[in-house]
Amino acid sequence: MLLSDPNIKMLIFSVTFFSLFLFCYGIAQYFRQRERKRELIEKIGRSNQAGIIQYEGTPKTKSDITFFTPILNFFNLLGNRVSPKVSDPSRVRTRFLRAGIRRKNAGVIFWGAKSFFVILFPAVFLICRFTLLGTVFSDRITVGLAVLVALMGFYLPDLWLYIKSKIRKEKLFEALPDALDLLVVCVEAGMGLDGAINRVAEETKLTHPILSDELKLMNLELRAGKSRQDALRNLALRTNIEAMNSLVTLLIQTDKFGTSVAKTLRVYSDSYRTKRFQKAEEIAAKIPVKLVFPLILCILPSLFVIIVGPAAIRIYENILTKF
């Protein structure tokens, strides 16, 4: 009798909602306090080790840290249990570097996210199947769809990583011409190659932050004692751009044979500008071919209706109605 009262039902729903809210809030606060303790321990450790340079890319804002840190910690705990042992970890790490992810435990978090979505997606599908859809699907179709949804959850992080890498690659490709022109100007003004790259990184910090971070990371590698050839190869490996690979190969050959860097960069800048112009012409030449299908499917049917439609109606009224 008490459960039939709408006020009692409303009270039960309210208590349940606030209990779940306080439970989730408590978990978030727990992970937040744990992250703060970890940051304090790392700061104390860094203060005791003078002269060690650590680079983590573009600094994160406070809101990003407080919001994403509990989620990443959860994926990290889950990934430590399910992540496989990789025979070539450098190859896996290269995938994350090309996407702009420099965390040491990126692979563990990645596998934790894959495992979480593999469980989450089928669970949500099965809950919707038995609560909302009812008997729409048979048991065999339900099992097949659950497996399909689990595969979607498993490959969703891979799709996200591919899209993130592709967007970053496009931004680097757009930023390279401006950086190359600045590099040519700096080298022709009398600066050394390392100083010119550092100057370009500082000048492009606001307009092209991704390329600026990559160039700064290259300068840090040079300061840490790596050779220029290795630092340039690592730059080409992280960016994964054909133009950057050609530029790095050219700079390595110039450094090896002792030719003029300014002349080499000037020649490469002119050839790269010609390649960009030819690529723009190629894209423009493909436009008429790409417009064929929209014209056939979208524009021509409407034109036929407008032009032929009145004549067809007139023919039907004057000729066919007389028989």
Image: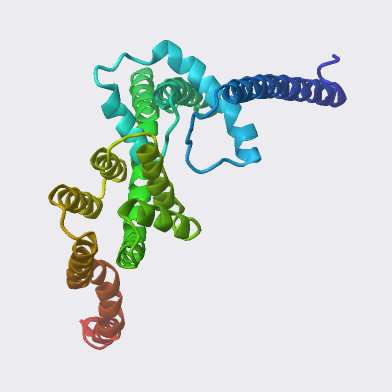
Residue 274 on image: x %, y %: 19, 70
Q: Residue at x 72, y 21 (%)?
A: 20
On screen, residue 168 above or below 234: below
Q: Quadrant of the N terminus?
A: top right
Residue 209 on image: x %, y %: 46, 53
Whether residue 159 is visible = no
Question: Could you tell whether 320 is left or right of 210 in the image?
Answer: left
Q: Nearer the viewer, residue 148 or 227?
A: 227
Quarter location, residue 114: top left
Whether residue 132 is visible = yes
Q: Residue at x 87, y 25 (%)?
A: 7
The residue furthest top is: 81
What is the count of numbered marks?
Answer: 0
Q: Quadrant of the C terminus?
A: bottom left
Q: Nearer the viewer, residue 8 or 73?
A: 73
Residue 232 on image: x %, y %: 27, 44
Question: Could you tell whether 9 is left or right of 204 in the image?
Answer: right
Q: Nearer the viewer, residue 169 or 25?
A: 169
Q: Residue at x 63, y 19 (%)?
A: 41
On screen, residue 223 above or below 202: above
Residue 55 on image: x %, y %: 47, 36
